[in-house]
Image (cartoon, rainbow, N blue to C red):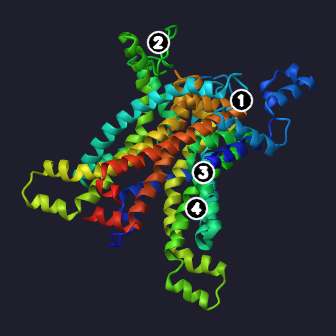
């Protein structure tokens, strides 16, 4: 391994995070090969505790929980990644417009961000998800609606600090368009911090999404979404295995995102990184 | 604040579902005159901008409208639900401050050695654990298996609440001299408060560690050490005191979060607070309820930030003349 102190691979947490994520992605891809049985097939073996045949036990309609957790990776993981990307795109565009054009555009967009940030995420997301109807798609939309302002603020600040740099001005003087200034000249300064934020926010997005499903405002039965599965466990709380395994799935995936984000932040934020090396 | 009313009003306009259908019975729905009367009662028959203006006008007079579910004034509902959340959040922030500061100091002092690494791992886990799941796990382990703590709700079933002074059962019971009741109420708070505190403990720990590390690099700390002061005194007098400044900020914001963000925990523990109220209003498409809760909660958020700003000036003399 290279002796570069800034390499992500020197951070054990980053390695653990990436490893867990890779495992989950593989589980999602090869779900049909891994899952011992059909995740939505019901049978008479209801509420069995973990045993040699059903390693994670069965739920109240006799579905194999291991199979459901495995197939759940196909629902929760892609959706979390999708919502992070959507929030990142929306937030970045709004932040870039606000920062680059300034004036009343900036003022209006930033007031909007402030207002959305003034709401506690879960309350706004819950109201939006409920208003649109309990469906997974609406829950994703609700989470995106709550998540974009963080990116907008970050990107606006980054643009403000570098839009008057000499290299941008000279590029403009050479006749570069606004689009070029934003996408070619300024983008490299923005993408690093935005990706770190995205890694840190991916976990939060996943928690919020599964929280909405838990409340019955996201995935609907018989979907094997992890949050909804924990919720099924709440109705049979004395049968611990129903809630514990899908919950552990959420925990490990969120933890992996946070490990990765945390390590990336240390690497990209020189001040923290320096403090750590001292 | 105007922006908040606008956003929450817009959210309620997203509704493709019919609030009338959810709040009236099926037989009532089949009678168009009843539906029309219901709409007229809640002003839903008027054009949308007019509904907004009417709402703002009522709001300025302190009227949050009438809940379509409880059929009472939203403000009455909130006044009943809020103390439960306040009580819960206060206990939670208490735990958070104690353990957050403790872990943060330990992590900073042992920076990059094993206690720091262990604490880093624990705090990352703390921010990653789904609270609704942790609530269930704690409920199962500490109530169902070990019986260390009582079941759901604010009091044991069938026990009368103390007559209302503050609405916070522990405080009310003590004020009435009913100490056994206060103890019972406190035991009921513990489990949800601990679950609620875990996330905040993690946030405060990381923040405390970071701000202490930043201060440790200052020249005056080096000077204090050079004078030969014992390390514990250096930490206490020259590091902790300035660090407290930024910790107060985060703790204030965290308290606002606890007041507003306890939906999932309240849901699992059947805790009748504003989180539960927000949940029930959302599920029942109770538009005045949703708006009332959003406005109150966002108001709390903004007030907390304001209080933090004021506290800041109080703690840091250099800002007073800034």
The label nearer to you, 4 versus 2, is: 2
Q: Which mark, residue B162?
A: 2
**In-image side of A94 versus B301 (left or right):** right
Q: Nearer the viewer, residue B120 or B304?
A: B304
> Looking at the rendering, which quadrant does residue A236 occupy?
top right
Residue lying furthest left: B228
Badge 1 crowding class, 10 Å Cα cut-off, few under 14, some 14 to 19, many 20 or more, is some
Badge 4 crowding class, 10 Å Cα cut-off, few under 14, some 14 to 19, many 20 or more, is many
Residue, x 49% and y 43% (percent of image)?
B303
Relative height, residue B247 to residue B54 (above, below): below
- The residue pinned by badge 4 equals A152
Image quadrant where one finds the C terminus of chain B: bottom left
Residue B316 visible here: yes
Dot 2 falls on a residue whose secondary structure is loop
Residue, x 37% and y 15% (percent of image)?
B183
- The residue pinned by badge 3 equals A115
Relative height, residue B19 to residue B107 (above, below): above
Badge 2 crowding class, 10 Å Cα cut-off, few under 14, some 14 to 19, many 20 or more, is some
Dot 4 falls on a residue whose secondary structure is helix
Q: Which mark, residue B32?
A: none
| Subunit bearing disc 2 | B
Badge 3 crowding class, 10 Å Cα cut-off, few under 14, some 14 to 19, many 20 or more, is some
Q: Which mark, residue B284?
A: 1
Q: CA distance from mark 1 to mark 4?
A: 33 Å
Q: Are marks 4 and 2 in contact (CB under 8 Å)?
A: no
Q: CA distance from mark 4 to mark 3?
A: 13 Å
Same chain check for tags 4 and 3: yes
Residue, x 29% and y 63% (percent of image)?
A275
Q: Nearer the viewer, residue B310 or B200?
A: B310
Q: CA distance from mark 2 to mark 3?
A: 38 Å
């Amino acid at each position: 391994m290279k002796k570069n102190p800034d390499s992500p691979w020197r951070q054990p947490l980053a390695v653990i995070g990436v490893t867990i994520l890779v495992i989950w992605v593989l589980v999602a891809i090869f779900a049909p090969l891994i899952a011992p049985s059909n995740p939505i097939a019901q049978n008479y073996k209801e509420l069995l505790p973990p045993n040699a045949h059903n390693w994670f036990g069965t739920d109240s309609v006799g579905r194999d929980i291991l199979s459901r957790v495995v197939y759940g990776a196909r629902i929760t993981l892609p959706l979390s990644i999708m919502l992070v990307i959507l929030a990142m795109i929306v937030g970045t565009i709004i932040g870039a417009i606000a920062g680059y054009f300034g004036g009343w555009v900036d003022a209006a967009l930033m007031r909007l961000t402030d207002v959305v940030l003034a709401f506690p995420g879960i309350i706004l997301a819950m109201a939006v998800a409920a208003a649109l109807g309990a469906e997974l798609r609406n829950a994703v939309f609700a989470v995106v609606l709550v998540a974009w302002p963080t990116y907008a603020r970050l990107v606006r600040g980054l643009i403000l600090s570098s839009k008057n740099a000499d290299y941008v001005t000279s590029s403009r003087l050479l006749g570069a368009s606004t689009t070029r200034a934003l996408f070619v000249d300024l983008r490299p300064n923005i993408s690093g911090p935005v990706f770190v934020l995205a890694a840190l926010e991916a976990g939060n997005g996943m928690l919020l999404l599964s929280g909405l499903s838990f409340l019955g405002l996201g995935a609907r039965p018989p979907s094997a979404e992890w949050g909804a599965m924990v919720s099924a466990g709440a109705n049979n709380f004395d049968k611990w295995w129903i809630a514990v395994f899908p919950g552990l799935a959420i925990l490990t995936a969120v933890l992996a995102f946070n490990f990765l984000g945390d390590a990336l932040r240390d690497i990209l934020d020189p001040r923290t990184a320096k403090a750590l090396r001292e | 604040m105007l922006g908040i009313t606008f956003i929450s009003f817009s959210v309620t306009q997203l509704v493709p579902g019919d609030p009338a259908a959810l709040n009236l019975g099926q037989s009532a729905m089949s009678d168009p005159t009843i539906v029309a009367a219901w709409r007229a009662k809640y002003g839903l028959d008027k054009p949308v901008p007019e509904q907004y203006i009417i709402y703002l006008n009522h709001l300025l007079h302190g009227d949050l409208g009438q809940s379509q579910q409880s059929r009472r004034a939203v403000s009455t509902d909130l006044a009943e639900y809020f103390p439960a959340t306040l009580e819960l959040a206060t206990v939670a922030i208490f735990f958070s401050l104690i353990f957050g500061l403790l872990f943060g100091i330990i992590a900073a002092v042992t920076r990059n050695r094993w206690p720091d690494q262990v604490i880093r791992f624990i705090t990352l886990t703390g921010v990653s654990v789904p609270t609704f799941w942790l609530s269930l796990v704690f409920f199962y382990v500490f109530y169902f298996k070990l019986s260390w703590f009582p079941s759901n709700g604010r009091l044991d079933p069938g026990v009368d609440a103390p007559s209302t002074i503050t609405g916070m059962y522990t405080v009310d019971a003590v004020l009435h001299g009913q100490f056994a009741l206060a103890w019972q109420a406190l035991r009921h708070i513990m489990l949800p408060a601990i679950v609620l505190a875990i996330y905040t403990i993690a946030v405060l720990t990381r923040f405390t560690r970071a701000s202490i590390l930043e201060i440790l690099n200052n020249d005056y700390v080096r000077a204090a050490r050079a004078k030969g002061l014992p390390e514990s005194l250096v930490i206490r007098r020259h590091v902790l005191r300035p660090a407290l400044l930024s910790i107060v900020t985060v703790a204030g914001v965290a308290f606002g979060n606890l007041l507003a963000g306890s939906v999932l925990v309240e849901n699992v523990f059947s805790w009748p607070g504003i989180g539960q109220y927000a949940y029930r209003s959302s599920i029942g498409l109770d538009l005045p309820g949703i708006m009332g809760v959003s406005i109150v909660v966002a108001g709390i958020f903004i007030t907390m930030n304001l209080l933090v700003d004021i506290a800041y000036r109080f703690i840091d003399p250099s800002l007073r003349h800034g």
